[in-house]
Image (cartoon, grey):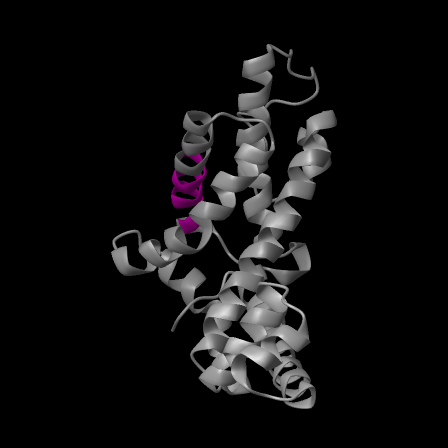
């Protein structure tokens, strides 16, 4: 992807989501983020049905907010905005589950989704939600990077990367299995690993700003 393509892509999905009838773009959004939302909710202590509710409630909230949403990097990333929306719903479910009273100074129904810092919806569980969000976000980025690189590099080199990095086999075992010497294994592993890192940086930038396929 050229720098121009990257800049074009960066705002494309967010722009298209303003059209609520654009089912393809909304499907792209859902496919990209549902598992992240679900896993964060589960790791935060919610049951499977509650986590599914969080996914649905978050997508509905984004749908309602999107017609008037204007991305402004100075006010934070799309990633942070989405965390605020999902985090509110996770915390609300946790409070209902444990019958925790809401803080008197926080009204979850009237908070400004786009402006309110995560700390203002916080009780002790909020830090855990944010930590789970960061870990799941990075895990999804790595999985996407590996998928993209898999289709772009020499299949044999990717196989070596798979064995050495993803399956954590020792280089000697990989070399013996594939009939290679250690230097060939290390070189292929290094090349694919670097490609995955570069791709992950690109995806991290795209997703943090709500980018998608043009």
Q: Is residue 80 above or below residue 178?
A: above
- Residue 110 spot, x, y in % from top left: 55, 27
Can residue 112 be spotted in the picture? no
> Depth check: 23 or 49 in front?
49
The residue closer to the viewer here, 133 or 15, is 133
Q: Does residue 121 lie above or below 155 as drawn?
A: above
- 156 above or below 95? below
Q: Position of residue 82 (x, y in %)?
A: 54, 47
- What's the magenta region? 57-66
The answer to whether residue 104 is magenta is no
Where, by quadrant of the figure, is residue 56 drawn? top left
**Residue plotted at (59% across, 80% down):** 176
* Residue 63 magenta-highlighted: yes
Observer-nearest of 39 and 205? 39
Residue 103 visible somewhere in the drawing: yes
The residue sitting at 46% across, 51% down in the picture is: 33
Q: Residue at x 36, y 62 (%)?
A: 16
Q: Position of residue 13 (x, y in %)?
A: 41, 64
């Amino acid at each position: 992807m050229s720098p121009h393509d990257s800049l074009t892509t960066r705002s494309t999905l967010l722009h298209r989501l303003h059209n609520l009838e654009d089912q393809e773009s909304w499907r792209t959004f859902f496919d990209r983020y549902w598992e992240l939302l679900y896993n964060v909710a589960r790791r935060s202590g919610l049951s499977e049905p509650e986590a599914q509710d969080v996914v649905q409630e978050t997508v509905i909230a984004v749908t309602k907010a999107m017609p008037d949403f204007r991305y402004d990097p100075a006010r934070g990333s799309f990633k942070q905005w989405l965390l605020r929306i999902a985090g509110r719903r996770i915390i609300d479910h946790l409070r209902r589950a444990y019958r925790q009273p809401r803080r008197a100074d926080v009204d979850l129904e009237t908070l400004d989704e786009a402006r309110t810092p995560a700390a203002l919806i916080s009780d002790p569980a909020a830090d855990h939600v944010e930590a789970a969000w960061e870990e799941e976000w990075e895990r999804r980025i790595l999985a996407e990077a590996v998928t993209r690189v898999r289709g772009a590099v020499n299949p044999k080199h990717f196989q070596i990367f798979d064995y050495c990095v993803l399956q954590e086999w020792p280089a000697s075992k990989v070399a013996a299995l594939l009939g290679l010497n250690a230097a060939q294994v290390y070189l292929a592993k290094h090349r694919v690993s670097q490609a995955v890192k570069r791709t992950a940086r690109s995806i991290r930038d795209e997703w943090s700003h709500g980018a998608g396929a043009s």
